[in-house]
Image (cartoon, rainbow, N blue to C red):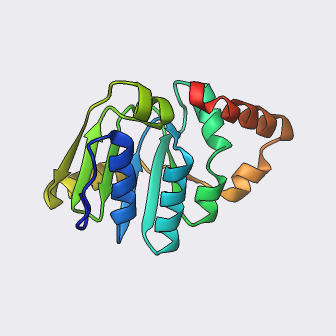
């Protein structure tokens, strides 16, 4: 774990502890990004304390409902200074995370409640600067165009309403 923190080996707690321990950078690549309020708050606080937070999502998701819900979910993250990037096609199902260029997480867990609480998932932590550097290059190469607050605001009202309605169903997605 980054810094001197240790966590129980539950995927959600590992993510939360890693984000809270970050001092310089957090890099995330995931196809499904619907974090709970604890993780949203942790990411926001990380950005507010000066950590560079980059999150890479697919430009074209294989589950449109998840993408719609994510669009309705990310405003607070963007407002705090986190950056969200869209990875151009083809669809990438990788789940990668690095912290401070020294710690990495690779596995099957998505950033959503179902994956972190209900599904059987496996993730592996690595504390190796060489591996973290390789994974950061992979994540950085996938940063296509950014998602901005102005792009979120420019969506037509019916799309915003659709996304918000789907977001209400997040626990079931």
In which quadrant is the C terminus drawn?
top right
Q: Is residue 73 above or below residue 148?
A: above
Front position in the image: 15 or 164: 15
Residue 87 appears in the figure: no
In which quadrant is the N terminus drawn?
bottom left
* Residue sticking out furthest to the right: 157
- Specify whether 35 is left or right of 147: left
Q: Residue at x 18, y 50 (%)?
A: 126
Q: Residue at x 49, y 36 (%)?
A: 112
Q: Residue at x 58, y 30 (%)?
A: 171
Quadrant in the picture for residue 64: top right
Count of numbered marks: 0
Measuring from the top left, give residue 11's x and y in whole percent. Answer: 34, 40
- Specify whether 20 is left or right of 104: right
Measuring from the top left, give residue 169's x and y in whole percent. Answer: 66, 28
Measuring from the top left, give residue 97's x and y in whole percent. Answer: 33, 49
Front position in the image: 127 or 136: 127
Residue 85 appears in the figure: yes
Q: Residue at x 77, y 44 (%)?
A: 155
* Residue sticking out furthest to the bottom: 50
């Amino acid at each position: 774990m980054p810094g001197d923190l240790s966590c129980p080996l539950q995927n959600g707690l590992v993510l939360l502890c890693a984000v809270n321990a970050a001092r310089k950078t957090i890099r995330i690549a995931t196809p499904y990004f619907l974090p709970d309020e604890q993780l949203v708050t942790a990411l926001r606080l990380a950005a507010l304390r000066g950590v560079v937070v980059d999150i890479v999502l697919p430009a074209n998701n294989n589950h449109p409902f998840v993408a719609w819900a994510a669009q309705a979910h990310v405003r607070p993250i963007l407002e705090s200074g986190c950056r969200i990037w869209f990875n151009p096609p083809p669809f990438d199902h990788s789940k990668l995370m690095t912290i401070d260029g020294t710690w990495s997480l690779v596995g099957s867990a998505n950033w959503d409640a179902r994956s972190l609480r209900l599904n059987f998932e496996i993730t592996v932590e690595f504390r190796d600067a060489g591996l973290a550097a390789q994974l950061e290059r992979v994540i950085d190469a996938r940063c296509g165009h950014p998602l901005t607050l102005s792009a979120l605001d420019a969506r037509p009202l019916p799309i915003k309403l659709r996304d918000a309605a789907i977001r209400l169903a997040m626990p079931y997605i």
